[in-house]
Amino acid sequence: ETGVTQTPRHLVMGMTNKKSLKCEQHLGHNAMYWYKQSAKKPLELMFVYNFKEQTENNSVPSRFSPECPNSSHLFLHLHTLQPEDSALYLCASSSQTGYEQYFGPGTRLTVT
Amino acid sequence: AQSVTQPDIHITVSEGASLELRCNYSYGATPYLFWYVQSPGQGLQLLLKYFSGDTLVQGIKGFEAEFKRSQSSFNLRKPSVHWSDAAEYFCAVGSSNFGNEKLTFGTGTRLTIIP
């Protein structure tokens, strides 16, 4: 595998479900990010991790819970989501914050 | 705080025609500048980047961009577009101050190509 991978690519979940999104980067980077991309809206930065430490949380609701066990892996745990949380969730990594980011293909999430 | 403006929400050009997508940024120091492209349902792909040096930078897929400090701009250009260039394009600004800085993205320009 090369670059940034995300699984699953598509996810449909009910509002009472619990699921997790996984991101893995094979680039040796130190920073990882979660973004939310909704139709007709700008790209929203959700969380930033730098050397496994969370350095930014952009007022994201607690129903989204990130986890970064090491510099190569990033998870987004989801529970009791709302229909408005349906979106494309993108993971990215960079060698340092402020440098160019490399994106995964995204997970298309639909909350029913 | 840094910011990015992409004034054009949607642009339509004919295949084979030239293209210029506009990007203006606001940042107090020397910025790092990037252009990304996104096909529907996909992640963002880095087209090119500017850190320092030559203000005209070449990227992948035949794209280039020019950094103009006096105009706070970093416009993306391509001399002849192909139908496969239809996508969403994002400009982004990063910081030369290391630490907890991050990229700030513009709202994107959707490019449509007509035959």
Image: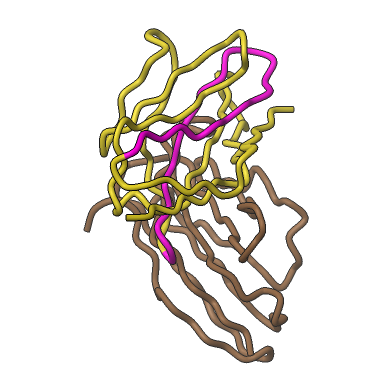
Chain colours: A brown, B yellow
Determine whether A73 is above or below B29 in the image. below
From the top left corner, tell me how far across and down residue A30 is, in percent. 44, 40
- Identify the residue shown where x is 53% and y is 67%: A88
Q: Nearer the viewer, residue B30 or A49?
A: B30
Q: Nearer the viewer, residue A1 or A51?
A: A1
Left or right of A106? Residue A66 is: right
Q: How many marks?
A: 0
From the top left corner, tell me how far across and down residue B105 is, in percent. 59, 40
Determine whether A55 is above or below B20 in the image. below
Is B60 colored magenta in this rendering?
A: no
| Image quadrant where residue B70 sits | top right
Determine whether B40 is above or below B80 in the image. below
Left or right of B35? Residue A112 is: right
From the top left corner, tell me how far across and down residue B114 is, in percent. 38, 55
Q: Give the residues in magenta.
A: B17-41
Is B32 colored magenta in this rendering?
A: yes
Which quadrant of the rendered structure holds the N terminus of chain A? bottom left
| Image quadrant where residue B59 sits | top left
Which quadrant of the rendered structure holds the C terminus of chain A? bottom right
Left or right of A8? Residue B62 is: left
- Identify the residue shown where x is 31% and y is 24%: B58
Determine whether A8 is above or below B71 in the image. below
- Identify the residue shown where x is 34% and y is 32%: B78
Q: Nearer the viewer, residue A94 or B19?
A: B19
- Identify the residue shown where x is 41% and y is 24%: B65
Left or right of A51? Residue B61 is: left
From the top left corner, tell me how far across and down residue B75 is, in percent. 49, 26
